[in-house]
Image (cartoon, rainbow, N blue to C red):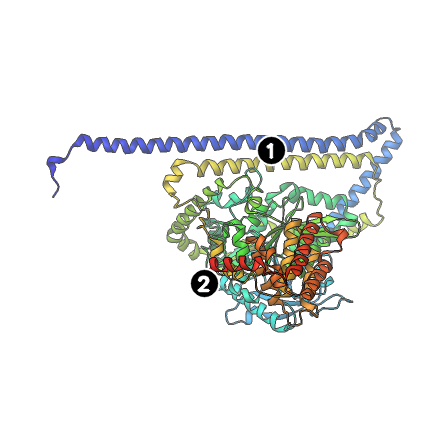
């Protein structure tokens, strides 16, 4: 029983007071940190706004400088000449306006025709439907297309087939091949058979992400069956198709060839303060609740037009003015390009509520994929089981998937580069300086350079030592040279400005869970009872992105009546001279409008970011939400030398023959050089896979030898060199090895000085050991025996 005689009210009050004082002190410190962060943000935003203002003013200044002479000539012109230039401009402007009007009418009609035809993929290539997901045991709206090669293209069965997964992020399918200079076109140019994973605009009623993943497994198995004599399929994931490709690879790692992730978000909380405002969207909208509400209002379907609208608001200067002015100013040449792109941009597709909920909870808000916490079906998604090489393409100019979101999953998943090497994984990333998100997929310049480099790389990547690399492209007179430079986790993290701010997103995830639970319990039943198929269709068709197309189409009875007027106006096209001063004044005016919209965007983004940090650094919000942890992955220390793969490799340091010796020497040269060229890797693969010296060597054998010898060179470089005479015992094998290495890495006059020095050391070692072979046992053999005893 409680002894009341020992109870002291004063001590009790004292303890309560101490606890409250401690809580108040923590709150004060939290408030101080919050204010410090807001002050820091204000400084960053002010600096950024000043930079933008300076940049925009410089652009205007240069434009005005160009018009200065014309403006002076205009002021001194005769009234008749001035009137003539004005008439020329008015005629040209009227005709351009009419042609823009006609282009918008065509866009509306193309949109309606596209919708009525079921929104087929906008591929610029012929295709046939191989598998319709609607007919699978668990129906989905996905299709596997076999793309027909262009005339004159011959498919090489020695090349791996390519499966492209297009993004289902509000738009329809086909962006990866909607023109000849595209991912599809470049794959065909290299002799690959291309398959395309497309989808219908409306999902099956009960469709989930698990069903989609399982359908893609069926697609992949079919491709493997159709190409029994080809390497494993290359899987390309564009944007959201990237995480879909990774889910697929984690489920069936043995079926996958190289994986290419183009502009794919994988680490959703990452980004730089002041540069990536889109990552704050979930926090500012109350988490997943708003998207789930829209899905319920859509009678169980989330309208992709909402996603597209969000993308457009990211860059209002281009979305609401720039692209239309570009059409207006270049309507004679830009109309068809505008229509082609808008056909894809306006092909809005829907997702089920279950799909949207999984994506938000596990990816965009929960960020669980790379940390191994994502659950798909009844299984945890473990990306570490993926053994296929991974190539990541990102851009600093991408405001939707910045490099941090494309790459930070790597340090989230692996404790170190040594772990990547020990597990036999090869991850290569390439960064573009300026191209935007859509440019990664549709730019002809990117297709002709970066995508060609990626296509070339997948042919040779199996010969690359496991590890983390950055792909560098060097433009030289003969061609673009590709090299791979080793990188560390610090190189990836250095692309950002630290990860402290990512801790706030754990609060967003927790808040999202709270709001979703409240919504599911109290609000959702009412909305679902009020939603019907008819109201859902009405809401979708009333979306501004759809109405702006329909209103200019022939469904509007006024539009056909204006056809004759447009035809009359544009019948005798009279473009104004580029030197017309009124044209130049028009360009200055358009630049001013776009500048103002860009300033608005910067101020809006600054306010959004400041509001986000004000809310989620607040001690009150932290007390209410009480996040469980920092949200950043906590890696346990991995002793790489104790991993089974490493123990096996080091135990075989003195075992092997000519193939092991050649591969080891080549890796030693790579280490000395500090980088490796793609052409050298391809020559190595050809030598190992097709040389008469290795008649029984298959693809799996090559991968195994490369992995094992790379581990030996990385972890025991001295022993790797000293044991070469044991691998290459005879003079004949040494001669063959050195010749083959020189055929692959040489000739001498083109080799890097450090690599040539290493080659000389190895050559001297082998010749020296040959001379001593009959005189005394090799000291290196003793060292190896001692090492083996230590390893055992």
Q: Residue at x 44, y 50 (%)?
A: 636
Q: Is residue 160 above or below residue 358?
A: below
Along the polypeptide, which appears first: circle 2 or circle 1? 1
Position of residue 29 measured from the top left corner of the image (x, y, whole percent)? 39, 31
Horizontal and vertical percent for residue 92?
81, 42
Question: Please, what secondary structure does the residue beneath circle 2 have?
Answer: loop
Q: CA distance from mark 2 to mark 1?
A: 45 Å
Residue 79, placed above or below residue 237: above
Residue 74 relative to residue 365: left or right: right
Q: Which residue is mark 1?
A: 48
506 above or below 243?
above
Q: Position of residue 377 (x, y in %)?
A: 45, 63
**Secondary element at tag 1:** helix
> Hey, which quadrant is residue 656 in on the image?
bottom right
Residue 301: give its label: none
**Neighbour tally class for label 1: few under 14, some 14-19, many 20 plus, Cα within 10 Å:** some
State the image coordinates of residue 14 (x, y, percent, origin top left). 23, 30
Residue 553 shows up from this direction: no
Q: Which residue is mark 2?
A: 377
Which residue appears at 80% of the width and 32% of the height?
Answer: 67
Local crowd size for mark 2, using a 10 Å CA cut-off: few (<14), some (14–19), many (≥20): few
Residue 67 in view here: yes
Q: Quadrant of residue 325?
A: top right
Q: Nearer the viewer, residue 462 or 95?
A: 462
């Amino acid at each position: 029983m409680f002894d009341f005689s020992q109870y002291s009210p004063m001590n009790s009050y004292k303890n309560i007071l101490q606890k409250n004082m401690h809580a108040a002190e923590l709150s004060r410190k939290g408030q101080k940190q919050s204010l410090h962060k807001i002050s820091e943000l204000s400084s960053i935003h002010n600096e950024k706004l000043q930079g933008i203002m300076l940049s925009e003013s410089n652009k205007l200044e240069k434009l005005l400088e160009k018009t200065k002479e014309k403006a002076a000539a205009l002021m001194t012109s005769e009234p008749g000449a001035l009137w003539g230039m004005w008439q020329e401009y008015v005629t040209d402007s009227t005709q351009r306006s009419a042609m823009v009007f006609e282009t918008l009418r065509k866009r509306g009609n193309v949109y309606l025709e596209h919708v009525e035809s079921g929104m087929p993929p906008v591929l610029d290539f012929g295709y046939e439907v191989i598998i319709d997901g609607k007919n699978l045991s668990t129906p989905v709206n996905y299709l596997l297309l076999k793309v027909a090669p262009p005339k004159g293209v011959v498919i090489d069965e020695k090349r791996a087939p390519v499966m492209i997964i297009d993004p289902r992020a509000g738009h329809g399918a086909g962006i990866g091949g909607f023109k000849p200079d595209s991912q599809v076109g470049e794959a065909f140019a290299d002799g690959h058979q291309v398959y395309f994973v497309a989808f219908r605009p409306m999902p099956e009623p009960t469709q989930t992400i698990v069903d989609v993943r399982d359908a893609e497994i069926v697609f992949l198995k079919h491709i493997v069956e159709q190409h029994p004599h080809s390497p494993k399929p290359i899987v390309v994931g564009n944007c959201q198709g990237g995480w879909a490709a990774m889910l697929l690879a984690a489920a069936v790692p043995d079926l996958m060839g190289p994986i290419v992730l183009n502009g794919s978000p994988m680490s959703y909380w990452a980004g730089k303060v002041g540069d990536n405002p889109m990552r704050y969207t979930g926090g500012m909208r109350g988490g997943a609740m708003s998207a789930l509400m829209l899905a319920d209002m859509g009678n169980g379907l989330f309208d992709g037009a909402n996603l597209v609208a969000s993308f457009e608001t990211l860059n209002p200067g281009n979305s609401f003015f720039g692209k239309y002015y570009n059409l207006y100013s270049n309507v004679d040449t830009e109309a068809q390009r505008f229509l082609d792109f808008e056909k894809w941009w306006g092909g809005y597709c829907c997702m089920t509520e279950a799909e949207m909920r999984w994506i938000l909870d596990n990816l965009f808000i929960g960020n669980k994929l790379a940390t191994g916490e994502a659950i798909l079906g009844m299984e945890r998604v473990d990306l570490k089981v993926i053994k296929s090489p991974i190539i990541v393409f990102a851009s600093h100019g991408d405001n939707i998937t910045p490099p941090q979101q494309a790459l930070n999953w790597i340090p989230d998943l692996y404790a170190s580069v040594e772990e990547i090497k020990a597990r036999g994984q090869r991850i290569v990333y390439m960064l573009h300086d300026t191209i935007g998100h859509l440019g990664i997929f549709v730019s002809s310049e990117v297709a002709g350079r970066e995508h060609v480099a990626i296509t070339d790389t997948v042919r040779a990547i199996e010969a690359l030592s496991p590890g983390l690399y950055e792909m560098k492209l060097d433009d030289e007179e003969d061609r673009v040279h590709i090299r791979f430079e080793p990188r560390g986790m610090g190189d990836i993290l250095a692309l950002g400005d630290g990860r402290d701010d990512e801790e706030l997103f754990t609060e967003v995830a927790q808040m999202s869970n709270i709001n979703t639970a409240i919504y599911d319990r109290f609000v959702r039943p009412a909305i679902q009872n009020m939603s019907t198929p008819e109201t859902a269709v009405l809401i979708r068709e009333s979306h501004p992105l759809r109405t702006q197309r329909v209103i200019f189409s022939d469904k509007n009875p006024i539009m056909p009546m204006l056809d004759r007027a447009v035809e009359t106006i544009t019948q005798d096209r009279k473009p104004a001279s580029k030197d017309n001063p009124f044209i130049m004044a028009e360009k200055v005016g358009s630049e001013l409008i776009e500048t103002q919209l860009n300033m608005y965007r910067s101020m809006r983004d600054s306010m959004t970011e400041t509001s986000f940090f004000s809310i989620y650094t607040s001690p009150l919000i932290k007390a209410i939400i009480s996040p469980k942890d920092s949200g950043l992955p906590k890696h346990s220390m991995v002793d790489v030398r104790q991993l089974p793969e490493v123990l096996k490799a080091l135990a075989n340091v003195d075992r092997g023959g000519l193939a092991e010796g050649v591969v080891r020497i080549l890796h030693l040269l790579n280490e000395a050089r500090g980088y490796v060229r793609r052409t050298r890797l391809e020559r190595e693969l050809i030598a190992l896979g097709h040389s008469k010296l290795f008649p029984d060597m298959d693809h799996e054998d090559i991968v195994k030898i490369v992995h094992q010898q790379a581990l030996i060179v990385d972890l025991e470089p001295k022993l790797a060199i000293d044991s070469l005479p044991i691998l290459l015992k005879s003079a004949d094998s040494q001669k063959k090895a050195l010749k083959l290495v020189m055929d692959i890495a040489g000739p001498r006059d083109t080799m890097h000085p450090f690599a040539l020095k290493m080659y000389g050391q190895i050559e001297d070692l082998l010749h020296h050991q040959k001379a001593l072979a009959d005189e005394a046992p090799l000291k290196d053999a003793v060292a190896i025996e001692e090492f083996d005893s230590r390893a055992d």
